[in-house]
Amino acid sequence: MEFDTIAAISTPMGEGAIAIVRLSGEKAIHISDKLFRGVGGKRLVDVHSHTIHYGHLVDPKTDIVAEEVMVSVMKGPKTFTKEDVIEINCHGGLVSVNRVLQLVLNNGARLADPGEFTKRAFLNGRIDLSQAEAVMDLIRAKTDRAMNVALGQMEGRLSRLIQKLRQEILETLAHVEVNIDYPEYDDVEEMTHHLLIDKARYVKAEIEKVLQTSQQGKILREGLATVIVGRPNVGKSSLLNSLVHENKAIVTDIPGTTRDVIEEYVNVRGVPLKLLDTAGIRETEDIVERIGVEKSRQVLKDADLILLVLNHSDELTIEDENIFAAVEGMDVIVIINKMDLPQKINMERVEQLAKGHKIIRTSLLEDRGVDELEEAIAALFFAGSIEAGDMTYVSNSRHIALLNQALNSIEDAIDGVESGTPIDIVQIDFTRTWELLGEIIGQSVHESLIDQLFSQFCLGK
Ligand SMILES: Nc1nc2c(c(=O)[nH]1)N(C=O)[C@@H](CNc1ccc(C(=O)N[C@@H](CCC(=O)O)C(=O)O)cc1)CN2
Ligand SMILES: Nc1nc2c(ncn2[C@@H]2O[C@H](COP(=O)(O)OP(=O)(O)OP(=O)(O)O)[C@@H](O)[C@H]2O)c(=O)[nH]1
Ligand SMILES: [Mg+2]
C-alpha cells in the first residue's frame, strides 16, 4: 500500500521534560536526515534500524539550529505502523515541539489526522479493528482493571475468539457443500442437519458467553451507575462529598437543597463509580424542586447500584417506604446516617424493608462508617467476580451491537434447521453470522466507518 509521510506531536500539549514528534512513511528517514546534524557528521540514512541518536535539528533554508534532540530510527516493517518510523525527542516546551513539527511539515511531511498512526497499523495489517479500538480504550481507561481489559483486547483476545468462530462457520459451510455435492451417500440430509445444528448451537453459546461479560465491560469503561436516593435532608449530598473526598455538592440543613442531578466519577477500591446525587424525593409544591424529584425518579431506572439513605434520628415515613418500593429488585445498600444523633428510626422495620440488602451505619458529620460503605461497594461488585485476567471481555458498544446481530442470525439458523427449512436458506443465516463477526475485527467494514472510528483518537496516536 502506498502512503504519504505523516507527522504529529505524540505527547500531550503543555510543558514537560521531553516531547516527541513522530513521523511515519516512506520519506520519514529522508526528511529527518535533511534536518539532522549529528556528532562527527553522522547521517540518519546510514544508521542501523532501532537505534537512537543525539544531535541538533537545523533549518536547511537558514542553517539556523532549531533544537537539540534525540532521534529514534525504526525501519519498517518491525514498527508500530509497519512503515519507517522516526521519533524526534525534543525539549518539552510548547515552542520547541511546535518548531520541530513545523520543520518536518515544511520539509515533506503532512500533518497526521487524529488516530492516523494507529489507522496505518490497521491498514498495514499489524492489528485488526478491535485491537485498534482497544488502543483508544487503553488511553481512556480510568482504572487498573479497565486498562487490563483493554490490554487483553489489544493483544487480540477478542480477535482470536472471533476468528475461531468464523473458522468454525466456514468449515461447516464447506462441509455442507460437500454433502450437497455427493448426495449419493446414505443419510446425507440427516448428517447435514446434525452438523448444522451442532455447530450453530456451539456458536450461539460462545457468543452468549462473551455478551454476558458486556455488562461488566461497560461498567469498567463507564463506571458503575450509582444513585444516591433518600428523603430530603438525610445527607445524600454529604455522602457524595465523603465518597469523592471533596465538597462537590452543596450541603445545607434546608430540606430540598439539591435540585438537579449531580454527577461525579470516583474510584472506590478499584471499582469505578459514576455517582449521582439526586434531589430528595418528596411531594412538593416548589416547581423547581418538583422537576428535580422527577429527575431523581428517572435516573433510578438506569442505576446499577442504589445507595438508599435514611435518617437515624427521624421516624420512617411513607416517603421512605415508597423509595424502598421504587428500588425493588435492584442492587441496594441501605445507609442509616446521622448515627451521632439520638435514635428515632425503627430498625426492625428497616430490616424488613431492606430484605437482606446490606445495611451500613454512618455519621457523615463525624466521618464514620464511610470505610465500611466502600468495603460493601467493592464486595458487591467483586462478588459478581470479575477476573480481567483470563476472560474475554467486550465493552465496546459497536462490538456488542454486532455480537447481538450475530446472535440473532445464528438463532435464525437454528430455527431454520429445526423447522426443516431448505439447507440453502440456512446457509444464508450462517454466512450472515460469519459476516457480522467479521465486522468486529474489521473484515468487510465500510471505509467511512473506519474513518469515523479513527477520527475519535487523539492527535499523534
Ligand atoms: N516511543 C514510543 N513509545 C511507545 C509507542 C510508540 O509508538 N513510541 N507505542 C505506541 O503505541 C506503544 C508501544 N507499542 C508498540 C507496538 C508495536 C511496535 C512494533 O514495532 N511492533 C513490530 C515489531 C516489534 C519487534 O519485533 O521488535 C511488529 O509488531 O511488527 C512498537 C510499539 C507505547 N510506547
Ligand atoms: N448530625 C448530623 N448531621 C448530618 C450528617 N450528615 C449530614 N448532616 C447534615 O444534614 C443536613 C443535610 O445534609 P445534605 O447532605 O444536604 O442532605 P441531602 O440529603 O442532600 O438533602 P437534599 O439535597 O435537601 O435532599 C446538613 O446540614 C448536613 O450537615 C450526620 O451524619 N450527622
Ligand atoms: Mg442534597
Image (cartoon, rainbow, N blue to C red):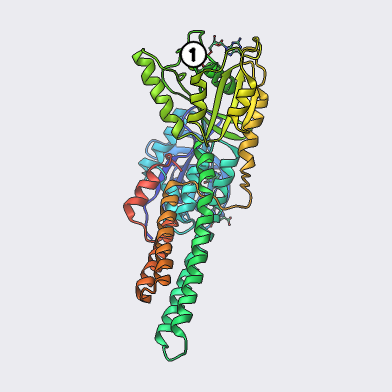
Quarter residue 310 falls in: top right
Judged from the image, the secondary structure of the residue bearing numbered disc 1 is loop
Q: Quadrant of residue 283?
A: top left
Q: Nearer the viewer, residue 188 or 28?
A: 188
Residue type marked 1: Ile
Position in image of residue 144 (x %, y %): 60, 39
Cβ of disc 1 within 8 Å of ligand 3?
yes
Which residue is most to the top?
Answer: 253
Q: Can the viewer see residue 156? A: no
The residue shown at (60%, 41%) is 145
**Above or below, 321 relative to 270:** above
Q: Nearer the viewer, residue 310 or 251?
A: 310
- Other residues around mark 1 within 10 Å, as few (<14) / some (14–19) / many (≥20): few
At 67% from the left and 21% from the top, the residue drawn is 369
Please state the total of marks drawn on the protein image: 1
Question: Looking at the image, can residue 252 be seen?
Answer: yes
Q: Quadrant of the N terminus?
A: bottom left
Q: Position of residue 357 (x, y in %)?
A: 61, 32
Q: Is residue 19 above or below residue 43?
A: above
Quadrant assignment, res 178: bottom left
Residue 270 sits above or below residue 86 on the image? above
Q: Residue furthest bottom?
A: 184
**Which residue is identified by label 1?**
250
Q: Give percent across and percent down for residue 159.
A: 51, 58
Percent x, y for residue 46? 52, 54
Ligand 2 position by quadrant: top right
**Image vertical order of residue 349 relative to residue 41, above or below:** above
